[in-house]
Image (cartoon, rainbow, N blue to C red):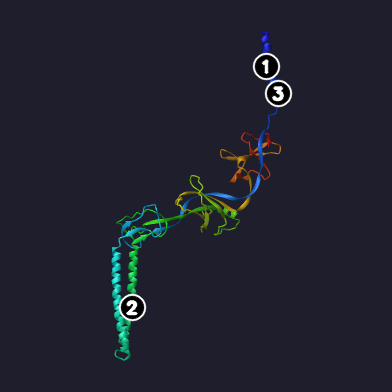
Amino acid sequence: MRYNILLIALLVLSVQSCINPIKQKNPEPVVVSGVLVRRDTIAVRESFISSLTPNYVAIVQPRVNGYLAAKLFSNGMPVKRGEVIFRIDNRKQSADVLSAAATLEAARANAIEAENNYNRAIPLAKIDAISKAQLDQYTAQYNAAKANVKSAEQNLKNARLELDYTTIRASIDGIISTSEAYAGDYVGPGTKFATLTRIENIDTLCADIAIPVAQYLALSGRKSFTYNNKDLLSDIELYLADGTLYPLKGSYSFTKSAVAASEGTIVIVVTFPNPDYLLKSGQFARVKSNIGAPQPRLTVPQSAVNDIQGVQSVWVLKADSTVEYRAVTLGNSYAGRQVVLAGLSDGEMVVKEGGTKLSNGQTVKVL
């Protein structure tokens, strides 16, 4: 029995002698990759939420009254300029053309008769066969007849124009909307259907960019608002609702004349070409653009930034080979680097890789 107890005690001492030296050793420092904070001159890139609107819209309104005879388009489909989209019953206008043409012929016949009477009266007046008053009468009748011809010609033109108005054509290329009027409805000025439909030109679509006045002045380097902001924006991109980058770049169009006083913003309109009609009016749009001239910014590799529950941070390498946890405020990213707006200073070094298991104040070995 005593022999067994002694044996156990010896085993315990032996194990402790093996463990204690391990406990007394200092842990090996974590090996990390470090990189200096870099100052780059880059453009300030901002993101804006907007929606797409047509470049311009044509309102289709009939110019004559009448019963709608036909609607010749499919709702929501493309139409071309000059394409017939509505027809109005034109029987009245056709009759007016015939009546005006007949009136013109009668006016021309009267003018010929008046001209002949005038030409015969001139030599008779020279030999005093007729009085001066009679010659004046023939002259007045001739002039009145010529005026009646001109009036009748104009009436015929107007009648033909009214007839032409019964055929309604698309005034622009675009996407045609629906119409509440159907065949048999009485349409035209002063009626329930004074407007038949609208056509949206979407060869080019517009997006409004709202920039706070303070930011506009700071980034533009100006002291007051100006209407010519062509040089303010560059590299304008459009991202669709699913995050897809639209392949065609945007361009500056114009600056809206009024500043939104309630919001304190300046609205700049940018346009995007839409040759294949991939974009639709009213579609959600996220517009990204460089604003103003490039400015110096502190940057770090994107791999150096940690994002935990929405808080961005980096591990800063100290002179004593320890690391310090540092929350940072980030700006834009570009070419694998991240702009740091606050939290770092020029010349500091951060952990580029291997910082996932670090703790504040921990000793590290920098590669």
Residue with the mark numbered 3:
21
Residue at 29% across, 78% down: 110
257 sits to left or right of 25? left
In the rendered image, the vertical position of residue 287 relative to residue 83, given as above or below: above
| Residue 291 located left or right of residue 17 | left
Is tag 3's residue or tag 1's residue first in the polypeptide sequence?
A: 1
Numbered disc 3: secondary structure? helix
Q: Which quadrant would the C terminus be assigned to in this image?
A: top right
**Dividing the image into 4 quarters, which one contains the N terminus?**
top right
Disc 3 crowd rating (10 Å Cα; few below 14, some 14-19, many 20+) is few
The residue depicted at 34 percent of the width and 64 percent of the height is 164
Separation of disc 3 and disc 1 at Cα? Answer: 15 Å
Residue with the mark numbered 2: 146
Where does label 1 land, which residue?
12
| Mark closer to the chain start, 3 or 2 | 3
Report helix, strand or loop for mark 1. Answer: helix
Q: CA distance from mark 1 to mark 2?
A: 137 Å
